[in-house]
Image (cartoon, rainbow, N blue to C red):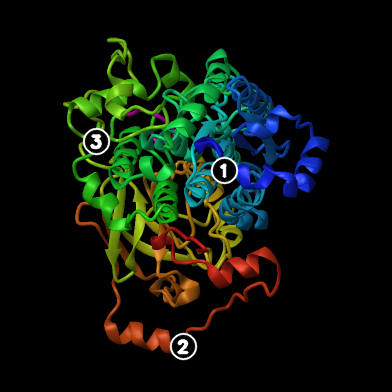
Amino acid sequence: MSKKRKYSSPLVDGPLQATSRSMLRATGFNDDDFTKPQVGVASTWSMVTPCNMHINDLASLICDSINEQDLKSVLFNTITISDGISMGTLGMRYSLVSREVIADSIETVVECQSFDGVVAIGGCDKNMPGCLMGLARLNRPSIFVYGGSIKPGENHTDLVTVMEGIGSYSSNKISEDELIAIEKTALPGPGSCGGMYTANTMASAIEALGMSLPGSSSQDAISNEKKLDCKSVGKAIDNLLEKDIKPSDIMTRKAFENAIRVIIALGGSTNAVLHLIAMAKSIDVKLEIDDFEKIGVSSPLMADLRPSGHYLMSELNEIGGIQPLMKTLLDAKLLHGDCLTVTGKTLAENLKDVKPYPANQKIISSLDMPIKKDSHLKILKGNLAEEGAVAKITGKEGLNFTGKAKVFNSEEETLDAIYGSKIKSGDVIVVRYEGPVGGPGMREMLKPTSAIMGQGLGDKVAFLTDGRFSGGSHGFVVGHITPEAATGGLIGILEDGDEITIDAEKGTIEVNLTEEEISSRKKKWSNPKPSPNKGVLSKYAKTVKSASEGAVTD
């Protein structure tokens, strides 16, 4: 048995495995294929979203590159859903759930089919952490390939432009015809949402982690670069098989620290906290919510990327992608250069010959003059979030906010209030029963935060939830409040008019209530929202852990 065939050999070798071989012959295997290491290729192709509609074209290139290395590729599918399409609807409850389904399905297929190595291709938000969690559990030679970013739309627009346009329309700032014109031109073709939203955040984190090939995270979905990325996979996975380099060799504690620093420098999504904790758990690396605060103190925000900034990932790619940024951070001793990657080389070796950004570029600031000297991802604690909450505060919104609560028990109630112009300057919008258990599913609040921005209230109100935010959300937003309302968290007893103070400098989030008042309200509290009694949401609600633990179901 070849050292590269330690999983597939028991499946196909010898007379007693004739049945297995017979079925595989029907799928196209020939005699020679049974002697080759088998590499499963997990495709997230789907026509439900532009993020993934091109993935099978990339999968075909990957399979060809694997087969050219005297390996045998076997293509299979897992699911994807669309956050952007389902945003603001009950369908969004399934978004975070899909991360677990993707991880479970990749684990299921690979273990059952006994693949020696795995390549996973992801596009939309939950594909990426879902794929990595599956690869981590399996712990056999693996590579992740990012499907790539969408091109900018007409007039430098994207999906968030459309959502903020709805807010502008609702406050009579633009006409319906103007809104429809944005709608028709903002998304020109395949690829993940173009800003430093969750998809591009996680793609960048995975490259920094060492689990994708250099440059993979910033490439346009439809480009020669992305094709070359896919064509390079065969040699890379063969090298990993030959050297028996596994995710556990790459996804180390130091590698996760690298990923955190890179996504902070890029101004990445709050979802990265949730997903990186979950990915670390899958590979038995201890990573906690407080680590983001500890690392963030010495991690500058350097990228002028949307949603808080101006530029899109496609434009960052034009000046070199994230590799020059990583080289800058490495030279400043902010990254661990000795971390192994899927190239078989260390991070420092991969970055050795990377050239700096062009001198006249405006997207990435210098280390001595960053946009913000420390992280925009703030971990807040206090009586309103004893286990922690995650804030996205770039400094543009200010660093503290005190206001009166306006409380809603669902995203739908919140949207009705925003579109009905019932939200005023100084309000603290509170959206509860949207956590992992309470949703169930922990919906993203992109639609209400975009509506707030579109109405010009982005720096005038705060927004709190036990749900999540899209990477496209910006403003004074605090999510992942734990304990969540459905499990007895203090957010569940808030009332209209309660005074709430958020202090990003001190890292606190407090409601101004006496212990007596809190005790009195808790005695009267009951969960107003019944959990589903069957189906995937029911299973999820029964098994999911707190957002502070990554909302995992393991």
Could you tell me which residue is drawn at 33 percent across and 84 percent down? Answer: 517
Q: Is residue 498 magenta?
A: no
Of the numbered discs 2 and 3, the one sitting upstream in the chain is: 3
Is disc 2 in contact with disc 3, using a CB cutoff of under 8 Å? no
Question: What kind of residue is marked 2?
Answer: Lys
Q: Is residue 176 visible?
A: no
Residue designated by label 2: 524
128 lies above or below 543: above
Closer-to-camera residue (178/23) = 23
* Front: mark 1 or 2: 1
Could you tell me which residue is drawn at 53 percent across and 52 percent down? Answer: 444
Residue bounds of the magenta highlight: 303-308
Residue at the extreme right: 26
Q: Give the number of the disc on residue 336.
A: 3
Percent position of residue 253, x then y: 30, 47
Assign the N terminus to one quadrant of the image: top right
Residue designated by label 1: 127
Is disc 1 in contact with disc 2, using a CB cutoff of under 8 Å? no
274 lies above or below 309: below
Q: Residues within 10 Å of mark 2 (few under 14, many from 20)?
A: few
Of the numbered discs 1 and 2, the one sitting upstream in the chain is: 1
Q: CA distance from mark 1 to mark 2?
A: 41 Å
